[in-house]
Amino acid sequence: MRHSLPLTPQFYVTAPQPCPYLPGRMERKLFTALQGDSAEKLNDGLSKQGFRRSQNVLYRPSCSDCAACLSARIDVRRFRPSKSQKRTLKRNDWLSRRASSPWATEDQYALFRRYLDARHADGGMADMDIFEFAAMIEETPIRSRVVEYTDGEGGDLKAVCLTDVLDDGVSMVYSFYEPDLHRASLGTWMILDHVAIALETGLPYVYLGYWVPGSSKMGYKAQFDALEVYRRGKWEPMRDPQDYAMEMHPLSTDPIAEQVANISLPDSRA
């Protein structure tokens, strides 16, 4: 007899560790397991509340003295590319897109290693081996795709994005690209192409992960038109980045118990 896991997830909090985005601060995450027959429904519901997926875990920043990490998404129906983004689209029209099931390859890992060594040699993924990389790509209990971008002529792999398909959008879980092509702005271009993917499939949003005011690593997300951020329990259109300075104040965060109590879980009867 097959038994389904109850849709009453337990939430946990990680131990504090140095924040990768804001120097001198500590980060902490609220997380829950993503498993069972209702994994997709849980992922859809919590993604709308600022959570992100990493393999079979859903997490959201829950720092004790800071609320700077704001989940960000693009409303694709309102989005209009800037002049520089139009140039980026034109500059990369030689690339071809190919979407497939989440299966890791040696070519992907080789590109991933080149990207990390050039861009994030001191980051948390710097020591990831091919087995851990395969787990990152393949361990997904929901609808996920690997979107590869190749040279239209030679077929060489130039960029990759692990993408989740939600009921209201596509979520860019992790992307990497050929570091030697830094002038091509491939990171920006992949976001623009995911806007196109969302439009092609009739989905209203592209989820980008977290935007962090005051972080140079995450500042690029504020350059996209029609950006929304999840703040104080609701999505709102992005305003002037300076308006979010108070999110870094210790009084900006709610107690863990209150955060968990305010999470809306999907109806297990549906």
Image (cartoon, grey):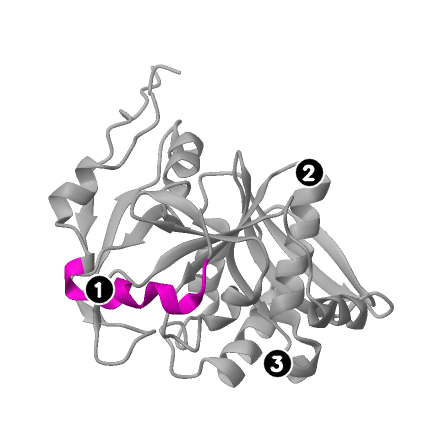
**Residue tagged 3:** 179
Question: Label 1 vs label 3: CA separation?
Answer: 32 Å
| Residue 102 seen in the figure | yes
Classify residue 36 by image quadrant: top left
Q: Earlier in the sequence, mark 3 or mark 2?
A: 3
Asked if the residue at tag 3 contacts the one at tag 1, i.e. Cβ–Cβ closer than 8 Å, the answer is no
Is residue 212 visible in the rendered image? The answer is no
Query: Amino acid under label 1?
Result: Cys
Disc 3: CA contacts within 10 A as few (<14), some (14-19) or many (>=20): many
Q: Amino acid at mark 3?
A: Pro
Q: Is residue 246 magenta?
A: yes
CA separation in Å, label 1 and label 2: 37 Å
Query: Is residue 206 within the magenta segment?
Result: no
Please state the horizontal and vertical placement of residue 195, each as a whole percent of the image.
Answer: 65, 51
Which residue was labeled with disc 1?
A: 66
Give the side of residue 22 with respect to residue 170, left or right: left
Q: Nearer the viewer, residue 254 or 122?
A: 254
Q: Quadrant of the N terminus?
A: top left
What residue lies at 67% left-to-right and 65% top-to-bottom?
Answer: 189
Image check: 231 left or right of 97? Answer: left
The residue depicted at 24 percent of the width and 29 percent of the height is 8
Crowding at dot 2, Cα within 10 Å, few <14 / some 14-19 / many 20+, comes out as few
Quadrant of the rendered image containing residue 244:
bottom left
Counting from the top left corner in percent of width and height, residue 7 is at: 29, 26
Q: Which residue is mark 2?
A: 201
Q: Which residues are magenta?
A: 239-251
Instruction: State the SS at label 2.
Output: helix
Q: Which is the main secondary structure of the residues drawn in magenta?
A: helix
Question: How packed is label 1: few (under 14 Cα within 10 Å), some, or many (20 or more)?
Answer: many
Q: Is residue 85 above or below residue 104?
A: below
What is the number of the mark on residue 199? none
